């Protein structure tokens, strides 16, 4: 369902677009918060067309279709935003490694956390280099806060692992 909502949101924000253009825009914007590849986007657009949420505005060379959101698609997007309680459950490999950290010795644990810390630093640098407009601004600030919190957690965990065993 979330890919469908993400695509409806993109079409609503950027206007009519081809599947290729949507995938490209997705890669440079939503991919920071929700991952989807070309192989997922195209079939979802076909389903959304069948469900009346988008329509093919025009078809060009080599079958390139330009999609636009329909009034039903706008209602679906608005309804999801107004009524959907977003899951707070996150599938996170970082959290899984943190959960299983006790299974390795202290030196290995430090190495794991140092790797995670480096990823948070890189993520924070990447996010700080982005300058989203109105579309994506709030997700960007959330991403920055999460990266900073992850970096702080890594620093705190490294300090804990470096303290003498009592």
Image (spheres, helix red, strand yellow):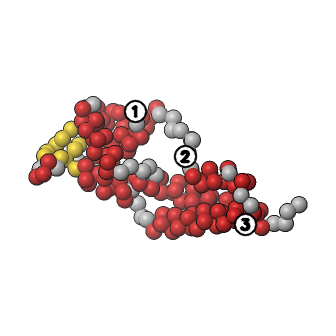
Residue, disc 2: 91
N-terminal label among 2 and 3: 2
**Is residue 80 visible from the viewing direction of this image?**
yes
Left or right side of 143 for 164: right
Kindly check if marks 3 and 1 are in contact, taking CB atoms under 8 A apart as contact: no
Q: Residues within 10 Å of mark 2 (few under 14, many from 20)?
A: few
**Is residue 156 visible from the viewing direction of this image?**
no
Left or right side of 64 for 89: right
Kindly check if marks 2 and 3 are in contact, taking CB atoms under 8 A apart as contact: no
The residue sitting at 35% across, 51% down in the picture is: 37
Q: Residues within 10 Å of mark 1 (few under 14, many from 20)?
A: few
Q: Position of residue 155 (x, y in %)?
A: 69, 65
N-terminal label among 2 and 1: 1
The residue sitting at 69% across, 64% down in the picture is: 108
Left or right side of 127 for 69: left
Residue, disc 1: 79
Q: Secondary structure at mark 2?
A: loop
Residue, disc 3: 107
Q: Nearer the viewer, mark 2 or mark 1?
A: 2
Left or right side of 101 for 57: left
Q: CA distance from mark 2 to mark 1?
A: 25 Å
N-terminal label among 3 and 1: 1
**For residue 37, above or below residue 148:** above
Q: On the rendered image, what quadrant is the N terminus found in?
A: top left
Q: Secondary structure at mark 3?
A: helix
Q: Position of residue 75 (x, y in %)?
A: 33, 33
Q: CA distance from mark 2 to mark 3?
A: 26 Å
Q: Position of residue 66 (x, y in %)?
A: 19, 47
Q: CA distance from mark 3 to mark 1?
A: 50 Å
Q: On the rendered image, what quadrant is the C terminus found in?
A: bottom right
């Amino acid at each position: 369902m979330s890919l469908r909502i993400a695509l409806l949101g993109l079409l609503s924000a950027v206007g009519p677009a081809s599947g290729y253009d949507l995938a490209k825009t997705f890669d440079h914007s939503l991919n920071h918060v929700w991952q989807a590849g070309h192989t997922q986007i195209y079939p979802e657009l076909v389903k959304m067309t069948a469900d009346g949420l988008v329509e093919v505005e025009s078809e060009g060379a080599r079958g390139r279709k330009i999609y636009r959101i329909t009034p039903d698609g706008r209602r679906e997007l608005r309804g999801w935003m107004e009524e959907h309680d977003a899951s707070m459950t996150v599938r996170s490999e970082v959290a899984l490694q943190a959960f299983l950290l006790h299974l390795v010795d202290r030196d290995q644990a430090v190495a794991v956390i140092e790797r995670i810390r480096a990823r948070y630093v890189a993520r924070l640098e990447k996010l700080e280099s982005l300058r989203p407009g109105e579309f994506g601004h709030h997700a960007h600030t959330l991403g920055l806060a999460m990266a900073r919190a992850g970096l702080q957690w890594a620093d705190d965990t490294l300090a804990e692992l470096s303290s003498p065993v009592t």
